């Protein structure tokens, strides 16, 4: 017997109509590429998105066509999120930090029809315009007064003119919720990038789950500033969650340095933010260096790579900003786990609570996890056994865009490529990416633990631990470190810092001090580059 409830498809456009109706006056504040602060509301977002949907239709964009963006976090990008997906086309957020060759490869693979871009990316667009094979129109996301003149982009369209020229009367179409809504490529450290193609259904379900109090905890009373870019897994879903709950949104544009972010947090009363650890480092350095505080910020989501406990302590103990450690992947829309404590943990002392917060957290409803050994058999959830983390759920990828055959799944589970433990309470802790694991004398050493210890040293800015070849043990841990400005640190002092903090044989064999660690397009340390540079470091040091 079927239930007798209405069958309404879960569509992204419904988030927008809800926000317009119930939170129409709520603000969306953007620091623009043009340099000023722009203020709008959900009502304006809805109206302009409808105009844009008419503009897309007028330019022949059809259901399922891919519409690409090269853009920062801002209100125009948000309008594209809703106009493109809402009208049944697919929003493809290109990552401008990739090499132009890769952007061309991805745009061709996606068969993008139109490319919208922020003015800061004009040189990139000029470099790729004659090379992308399917893009029929380029649109500069600005007004007539700021339109660039470019010989390489004849027929360049003006975003504001497109919006103004079309009527705000548009009825969002209804269609199958399984239709594709947006497309995001993983950075592909090996091989070609791969596309994760989200659906309206997966996006809506992910939004419900991500907004919950024990997940990202979003509310109409929040002022949310997503630092994580809208070109990186849909800014972790915050542009959708904000509409669902009616939160005020603050977009930082291209200004992600500590001072710009802190100024915006204070000026707009930001209560909640989200980003990768490398961004927060800049912010903390600015706040510490200038004796500042956070007057309204109450919590921040940190994920994308492991959040060092030293960073959590700084936020929580010095600034009263709660850290929500989260883990996810492009292939998971992205939220998989968030580390929010349970009632039993409240009685623990600060150190024990910090040990739990260092974990990546427990599943949000909808994400099922298990860990398996090399034989593919499930391992116990005892907080000790470490194996490859496998996931399944309605917002987890089943196959890559244009993927062949059965795709990446193993018996219906997606292998994450992460190695982790899961404890009896369900808290998952990543020890490594499988390709970054250090195998010393047949035993695994988790590089994240070693990095967290190094980053707890007051003189260390960033640390990465890689497997270096070793004649006796096959591989041994090697630390590659940058120090904070003005700080002096010796190899022996840093290695001595490991005493008593970790099993002796886990202590790295050596330290390489560098001026900068290579960061990838999503702000993570590129360990493959470090391995290329330093994997023979210990061999060279042998007599
Ligand atoms: P890419 O790194 O290729 O851009 P993603 O952005 O999808 O791809 O990154 C997903 C990966 O990032 C995860 O598989 C995991 O290795 C890592 N990651 C994400 N969040 C965390 C976290 N909180 N702690 C440790 N690793 C994390």
Image (cartoon, helix red, strand yellow):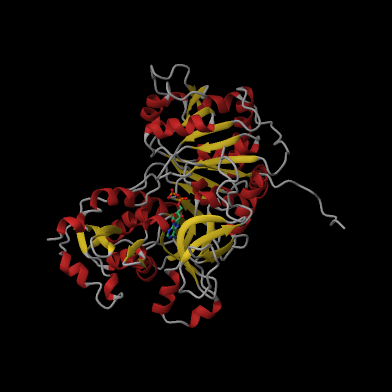
Q: Nearer the viewer, residue 129 or 123?
A: 129
Near-viewer residue (228 or 112):
112
341 displayed left or right of 497: right
Picture layout, residue 510 above or below residue 424: above
* Residue found at the far left of this picture: 543
Ligand 1 rendered quadrant: bottom left
Residue 315 pos. (x, y %):
38, 65
Asked if one can make out residue 290 in the rendered structure from this viewpoint, the answer is: no
Q: Which residue occupies 65% across, 34% down?
A: 87
Judge whether 232 appears above or below 498 on screen.
above
Q: Is residue 98 left or right of residue 463?
A: right
Q: Position of residue 339 (x, y in %)?
A: 49, 67
- Name which quarter of the figure residue 469 lies in: bottom left
Q: Quadrant of the N terminus?
A: bottom right
User: Would you say residue 73 is visible in this rendering?
Assistant: yes
Q: Is residue 524 above or below residue 428?
A: above
Between residues 184 and 488, which one lies in front from this camera angle? 184
**On the image, which quarter does residue 478 sit in?**
bottom left
């Amino acid at each position: 017997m079927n239930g007798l409830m209405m069958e309404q498809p879960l569509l992204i456009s419904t988030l927008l109509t809800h926000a317009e109706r119930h939170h129409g006056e709520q603000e969306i504040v953007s620091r623009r590429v043009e340099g000023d602060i722009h203020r709008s509301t959900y009502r304006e977002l809805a109206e302009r998105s409808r105009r844009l949907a008419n503009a897309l239709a007028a330019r022949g964009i059809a259901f399922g066509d891919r519409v690409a963006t090269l853009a920062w976090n801002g209100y125009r990008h948000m309008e594209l999120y809703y106009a493109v997906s809402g009208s049944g086309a697919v929003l493809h957020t290109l990552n401008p930090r990739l090499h132009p060759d890769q952007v061309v490869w991805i745009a061709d693979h996606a068969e993008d029809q139109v490319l919208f871009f922020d003015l800061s990316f004009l040189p990139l667009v000029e470099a790729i315009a004659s090379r992308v094979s399917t893009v029929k129109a380029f649109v500069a996301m600005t007004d007539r007064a700021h339109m660039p003149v470019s010989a390489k982009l004849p027929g360049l369209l003006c975003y504001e003119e497109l919006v103004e020229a079309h009527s705000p009367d548009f009825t969002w179409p209804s269609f199958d919720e399984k239709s594709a809504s947006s497309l995001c490529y993983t950075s592909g450290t090996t091989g070609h990038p791969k596309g994760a193609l989200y659906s309206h259904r997966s996006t809506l379900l992910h939004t419900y789950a991500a907004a919950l109090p024990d997940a990202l905890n979003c509310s109409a009373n929040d002022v949310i500033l997503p630092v994580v870019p809208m070109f990186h897994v849909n800014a972790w879903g915050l542009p959708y969650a904000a509409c669902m709950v009616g939160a005020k949104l603050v977009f930082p544009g291209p200004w992600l340095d500590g001072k710009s972010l802190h100024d915006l947090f204070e000026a707009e009363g930001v209560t909640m933010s989200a980003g990768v650890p490398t961004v927060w480092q800049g912010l903390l350095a600015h706040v510490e260096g200038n004796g500042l505080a956070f007057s309204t910020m109450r919590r921040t989501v940190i994920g994308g790579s492991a959040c060092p406990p030293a960073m959590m302590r700084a936020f929580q103990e010095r600034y009263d900003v709660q850290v929500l450690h989260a883990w996810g992947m492009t292939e998971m829309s992205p939220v998989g786990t968030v580390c929010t404590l349970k009632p039993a943990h409240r009685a623990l002392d600060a150190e024990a609570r910090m040990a739990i917060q260092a974990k990546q957290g427990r599943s949000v409803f909808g994400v099922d996890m298990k860990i398996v050994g090399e034989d593919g058999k499930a391992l116990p959830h005892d907080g000790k056994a470490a194996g490859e983390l496998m996931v399944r759920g309605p917002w987890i990828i089943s196959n890559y865009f244009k993927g062949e055959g059965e795709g990446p799944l193993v018996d219906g589970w997606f292998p994450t490529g992460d190695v982790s433990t899961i404890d009896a309470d369900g808290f998952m802790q990543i020890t490594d990416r499988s390709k970054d694991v250090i195998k010393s004398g047949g035993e695994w050493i988790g590089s994240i633990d070693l990095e967290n210890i190094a980053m707890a040293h007051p003189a260390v800015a960033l640390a990465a631990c890689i497997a270096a070849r070793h004649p006796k043990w096959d591989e041994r841990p090697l630390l590659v470190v940058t120090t904070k400005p003005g700080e002096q640190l010796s190899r022996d002092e840093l290695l001595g810092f490991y005493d008593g903090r970790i099993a002796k044989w886990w202590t790295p064999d050596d330290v390489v001090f560098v001026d900068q660690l290579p960061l990838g397009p999503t702000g993570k340390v590129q360990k493959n580059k470090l391995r290329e540079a330093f994997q023979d470091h210990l061999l060279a040091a042998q007599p």
